[in-house]
Amino acid sequence: MNIHEYQAKALLKSYGAPVADGVAIFTAAEAEAAAKQLPGPLYVVKSQIHAGGRGKGKFKELSPEAKGGVRLAKSIDEVVANVKDMLGNTLVTAQTGDAGKQVNRLYIEDGADIDRELYLSILVDRSVGRIAFVVSTEGGMDIEAVAHDTPEKIKTFSVDPATGIMPHHGRTVAQALGLTGDLAKQAEKVLAQIYNAFVAKDMAMLEINPLIVTTQGQIKCLDAKVNFDSNSLYRHPDVVALRDETEEDPKEIEASKYDLAYIALDGTIGCMVNGAGLAMATLDIIQLYGESPANFLDVGGGASEEKVTAAFKIITADPKVKGILVNIFGGIMKCDVIARGVIAAVKAVGLKVPLVVRLEGTNVEEGKQIIRESGLNVIPADDLDDAAQKIVAAVKKA
């Protein structure tokens, strides 16, 4: 689960991390009062969307010459003018795609005099099963570009969970970032603060880009991007309360209610599969035969008839879907349960596109019999290759 920048900063601040003062607003009428709460004279007006590249982004409704999604203002009047320009408009960035995202909230923040911009992030390094820090002197830039062009400028190290964060970790970061004296001590302190926040809140990723050194010799978290481990959210009702569903695909929200692993994609063939590995293989083979998948959907090993029905309804709710491929290799998941769920869903929502079903494994004959006797126009398939070819052919024919 992702949260907005202003929410991430409030969370980090509660653990003592140095962040600038700021006020989140939802309407243009709040702009002047919000700006007056800050010391000034420099203000930053930031679009709050779940996507990076906001500063370089462009608003669909404004002229190409208009400023992006992060703007400097040198007076309260400028703040108000920028808020009216940005709020409610659609911001297109490198990460949003051409559709962009509507800006429904803004963050007005106290400006900073920047001397240096650095990069700091924490994530879980699956290769060693530990929390790892990624740091670079090249802050304020696309870290993927830094990794591609100058990988030697990125340093990574992990933390032993038995000891947790230690002073030597702070010294390692300070050395990697070229910080000495008081700045090195500040870096050590900030590192411990954000590590504690990361662990306490079960974060999956925390990125501060940039981490700045001000001209006054202070380290501050100028931006913050946080992603939480969704499996841990039951332990953090305070984090769940920060969820902004307007930033999420409605189909993915519906899928989460049934604990379905669903991700919307750009293609035309809807997929319902059990097992993430088989799902990935299904997406690949659809692509191989000349079409594109409309979604990733793993119903899991213990899906009920209700869950399968919900999954099918989510797939058919996507207007891009021109055909559906159900690919089940039943182990824990029983083929007859899948079959009954599909039949129930088709009867509830109707079937307006071709449907190919490939069943194999536990109770496969019962499953195939249920589909045969349903009277529905279902195309059976013998294996994954056969299923992919049949759904692609059916979509092209339709």
Image (tube, grey):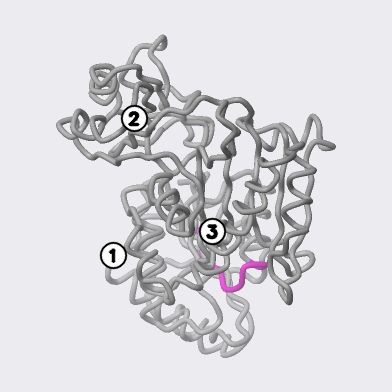
Comparing 156 with 228, the one in front is 156
As for residue 119 lying within the magenta part, the answer is no
Task: Describe the element under mark 3 as helix, strand or loop.
Answer: strand
- Closer to viewer: mark 2 or mark 1: 2
Of residues 315 and 97, the one drawn nearer to the viewer in this rendering: 97
Query: Quadrant location of residue 120?
Result: top right
Question: Magenta residues, as a range?
Answer: 269-278
Q: Is residue 333 left or right of residue 124?
A: left
Which residue does the numbered mark 1 point to in the structure image? 349
Q: Of label 2 and label 1, which has the lower sequence position?
A: 2
Report the amino acid beneath label 1. Val
Q: Amino acid at mark 3?
A: Phe
Q: Residue furthest right?
A: 152
Judging by the rendered image, the residue that carries numbered circle 2 is: 90
Viewer-proximal residue among 274 and 149: 149
Looking at the image, which residue is at 56% across and 90% down?
A: 363
Question: Does residue 272 show up magenta in the picture?
Answer: yes
Task: Name the residue furthest left.
Answer: 29
Q: Residue at x 73, y 73 (%)?
A: 163
Pick whichever of labels 3 and 2 is earlier in the sequence: 2
* Residue at numbered disc 3: 296
Measuring from the top left, give residue 100's x and y in whole percent.
Answer: 41, 33
The numbered disc on residue 135 is none
